[in-house]
Amino acid sequence: MNDAKVHIGPAAVDRLRELGLTGEILTGSVLYGLGFLADCTNNDPPSAKGILVWAKGTRRIRDLLVPLGWIAENNRNYSITVHPTDTHAIAVSTGDFNTGNPEGEPTTSKKGPETEAAVKRNAYQMAFADVNKSFQAPMPTSRTQTWLVLHHVNASTKKLHVELSLPCGMDVTGQVTQWLERILVEPVEFDLGPVPSNHTPVRSKPLVVPVQFRGS
């Protein structure tokens, strides 16, 4: 059982403000990324949808925050957006069905070594290194927190759930499973809709391309 501090309603709005953020920025950025799914079909690679939402959502967050002094950082291909004070950063991540549920314990998709390093720093800097004793505490850094913008679309209720959460532990599969703090944003209506089977033109005859060889 993970005893994360959960903020909802006005408390969530206030906590986001302390971090220089708003629910509109986070939800709007995820919605921007989700908008690119309309062009996906079953012919796209399986990972295309997740990559699109992550990449375009990250871009939108930066479009909104960089003019306010935030910094786009991509060290070792780990894309985060850093607050001007360098005290905290945010990254976009897919969450599971518990995302946005104050009683739930959300998990993420499988993460790589850079996320693991960030989670270790969170646990160490916030004096919660004992959350996962398998973690070897890293050296202190000026940046104390890396938060994840978790998002999940509930296909049954047709709602998008978003939360900004501070990870502090991972399981053996590489998923984030433990949190120090969770800030829940009000859900919004969103319908993924049907996925087109393909956009491939139908041809009644094989396409023949004439080739003319030059003489030697």
Image (spheres, grey):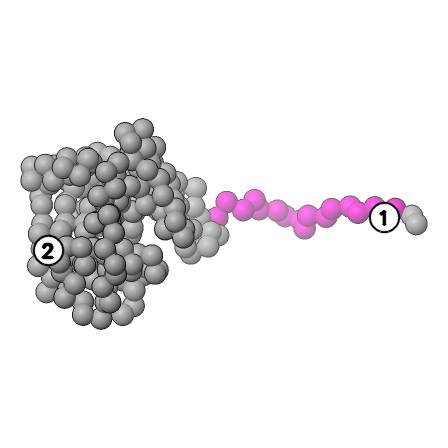
- Considering the whole magenta stretch, tell me its main secondary structure: loop
Mark 2 or mark 1, which is nearer to you? 2
Q: Is residue 203 left or right of residue 39?
A: right
Three-letter code, disc 1: Phe
User: Residue drawn at (10%, 36%), measured in percent from left and top?
Assistant: 14
Left or right: 16 as drawn, with respect to 142: left
Residue in the foreground of this view, choosing between 212 and 116: 116
- Mark 2 residue crowding within 10 angstroms, few (<14) / some (14–19) / many (20+): some
Q: Nearer the viewer, residue 187 or 192?
A: 187
Could you tell me residue 199's position as x and y percent?
50, 45
Picture residue at 7% right of the left edge, 37% below the top:
10
**What amino acid type is highlighted by mark number 2?**
Ala
Q: Secondary structure at mark 1?
A: loop
Q: Disc number at residue 213? A: 1
Residue 166 percent location from the top left of the image: 19, 51
Does any portion of residue 119 appear in the rendered image?
Answer: no
Q: Residue at x 31, y 41 (%)?
A: 81
Mark pair 2, 1: CA separation: 70 Å
Residue 159 is tagged as none
Q: Residue furthest right?
A: 216
Residue 198: horizontal and vertical position, in percent?
48, 48
In reply to whether residue 133 is colored magenta, the answer given is no
**Image point 40% across, 52% down: which residue?**
76
* Quarter where residue 47 is shown: bottom left
Name the residue that disc number 2 marks: 4
Residue range (magenta): 198-214
Q: From the viewer's perspective, is residue 138 above or below residue 206?
A: below
Q: State yes or no: residue 199 in magenta.
A: yes
